[in-house]
Image (spheres, helix red, strand yellow):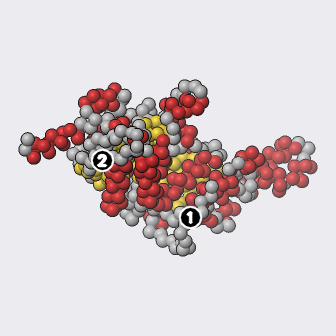
């Protein structure tokens, strides 16, 4: 066999991964192979593989060495929409994609190359866990990946796709990336295997219900996107990257705007459906929801205003801010700030609940996370108060005091230092007490308080609202304001970093 023939043979063997039988088993499980996934994700023909032939292992005494060509992970680079990205995809057909020292070294090399070139890195996770034969060396190698993800956070965007099992210490890989996508029916993310939980609980468990895409999108918030299948998942990643800069020194990708800058919105005086409001404001109604199934009291989306990428944050129409919603918004803001993506907030937030049990728990630090996220971020920040902004509900939702560049209000907004009923009782207590019909008098005084105090005019007179605008003009006002603040610069106090409220 000539050297060229040997090369071609070795290439063909490497491309087969674990072999035809393992590939068939992967397909029978409803999953694609690592290379098939990369083919779906990247522009056709753009993938260049690195370390294809790597093969080495460590073994703990008493266990048999386990190693195969490629070490169970496919790594390399290519393009998405002609923009470069690096990618690693665990190959379940090779030793169940088990994570070894060599496997980790390929992933770390991929991340290092991504940082050096200032481009995003995408990981596809599908593994049986750490390679047991390597013992603590495999766990230590996983920890090296976690350290690297922490180091590069805020420097380049990181995305993980849980496309099978992601069990054990590797679960932290998904949690440490900027964005995690899971696929309904095939993704599982947990710190221990289902059999471990079954043994501990003394009964069988439904692993998909507990550790699957629905659970981590709705209950834990570890995942930000849930997809029906792998094709949808790869399409979602491609759309997500269309909103993101390649690194923290680049600008988010601008798109020529084909929508009318002065398009009027059709909203009146009622608090609108906030998802519909964001779509109406965004160019051509094109948005991408972030954590759509988690803590729906706050809505977070990517979109564009006059071609410029923005992150939209909005309280839902109930006007209630929950602890989980506060943490969701804070994390979204943290990402926006890391890459200087403008934040547009639509406020409809009443004051916090009068609930001793919640307050004795983590209510205060959870809300403080949102305060900190707004206060410490330096990207352009715009706020439109479309409904309630009452008491601490006003204070936590991006007022000028927390760094908003411009704050607007609709004329129907309720802006007050305290809840309307409490304010009416405090100011008009004697009038209510003297009335023959206390209930009717109370309602009358609430209306009076709304008219005289809980309105945007008081706030505008005091300078905490820059302008009161017609709802129909919201899009054009935001576009004009964004053009003004896009080039803003802020000097921060010198320090290593602040202390996150926990």
Q: Which label sits on residue 143?
A: none
Residue sitting at 51 percent across and 71 percent down? 490
Neighbor class of circle 1 (other Cα within 10 Å; few <14, some 14-19, many 20+) is some
Q: CA distance from mark 1 to mark 2?
A: 46 Å
Pick whichever, 160 or 5, lies toward us.
5
Q: Which label sits on residue 56?
A: 2
Neighbor class of circle 2 (other Cα within 10 Å; few <14, some 14-19, many 20+) is some
Q: Is residue 414 above or below residue 481?
A: above
Say what secondary structure mark 1 lies in: helix
Residue sitting at 26 percent across and 42 percent down? 69
Residue 172 image offset from top left, x and y in percent: 48, 47
Residue 361 image offset from top left, x and y in percent: 70, 48
Say what secondary structure mark 2 lies in: loop
Q: Earlier in the sequence, mark 1 or mark 2?
A: 2
Residue 216 image offset from top left, x and y in percent: 51, 39
Residue bearing mark 1: 376
Q: Is residue 321 left or right of residue 305?
A: right
Residue sitting at 34 percent across and 26 percent down? 28
């Amino acid at each position: 066999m000539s050297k060229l023939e040997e090369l071609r043979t070795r290439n063909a063997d490497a491309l087969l991964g674990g072999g035809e039988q393992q590939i068939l088993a992967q397909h029978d499980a409803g999953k694609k192979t690592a290379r098939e996934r990369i083919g779906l994700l990247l522009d056709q023909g753009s993938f260049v593989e690195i370390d294809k032939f790597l093969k080495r292992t460590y073994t703990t005494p008493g266990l048999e060495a386990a190693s195969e060509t490629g070490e169970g992970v496919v790594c390399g680079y290519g393009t998405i929409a002609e923009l470069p990205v690096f990618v690693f995809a665990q190959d379940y057909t090779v030793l169940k994609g088990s994570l070894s020292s060599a496997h980790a070294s390929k992933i770390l090399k991929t991340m290092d190359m991504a940082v050096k070139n200032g481009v995003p890195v995408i990981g596809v996770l599908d593994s049986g866990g750490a390679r047991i034969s390597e013992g603590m060396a495999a766990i230590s190698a996983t920890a090296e990946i976690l350290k690297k993800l922490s180091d590069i956070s805020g420097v380049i965007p990181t995305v993980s796709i849980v496309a099978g099992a992601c069990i054990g210490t590797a679960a932290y890989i998904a949690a440490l990336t900027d964005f995690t996508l899971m696929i309904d029916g095939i993704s599982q993310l947990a710190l221990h295997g289902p059999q471990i939980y079954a043994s501990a609980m003394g009964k069988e468990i439904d692993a998909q219900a507990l550790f699957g895409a629905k659970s981590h999108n709705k209950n834990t918030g570890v995942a930000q996107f849930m997809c029906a299948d792998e094709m949808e998942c790869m399409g979602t990643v491609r759309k997500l990257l269309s909103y993101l800069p390649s690194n923290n020194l680049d600008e988010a990708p601008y798109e020529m705007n084909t929508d009318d800058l002065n398009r009027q919105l059709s909203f009146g005086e009622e608090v609108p459906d906030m998802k519909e409001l964001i779509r109406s404001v965004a160019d051509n109604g094109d948005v991408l929801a972030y954590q759509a199934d988690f803590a729906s009291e706050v809505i977070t989306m990517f979109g564009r205003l006059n071609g410029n990428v923005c992150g939209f944050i909005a309280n839902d129409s109930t006007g209630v801010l929950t602890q989980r919603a506060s943490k969701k918004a804070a994390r979204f803001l943290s990402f926006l700030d890391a890459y200087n993506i403008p934040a547009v907030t639509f406020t409809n937030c009443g004051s916090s609940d009068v609930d001793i049990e919640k307050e004795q728990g983590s209510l205060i630090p959870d809300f403080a996370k949102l305060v900190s996220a707004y206060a410490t971020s330096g990207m352009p920040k715009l706020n439109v108060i479309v409904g309630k902004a009452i008491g601490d509900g006003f204070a936590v939702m991006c007022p000028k005091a927390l760094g908003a560049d411009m704050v607007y209000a609709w004329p129907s907004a309720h802006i007050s230092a305290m809840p309307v009923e409490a304010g009416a009782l405090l100011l008009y207590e004697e009038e209510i007490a003297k009335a023959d019909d206390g209930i009717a008098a109370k309602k009358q005084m609430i209306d009076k308080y709304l008219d005289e105090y809980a309105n945007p005019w008081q706030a505008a007179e005091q300078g905490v609202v820059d302008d009161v605008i017609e709802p129909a003009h919201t899009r054009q006002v935001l576009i004009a304001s964004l053009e003004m603040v896009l080039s803003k610069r802020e000097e921060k106090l010198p320090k290593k970093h602040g202390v996150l409220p926990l």
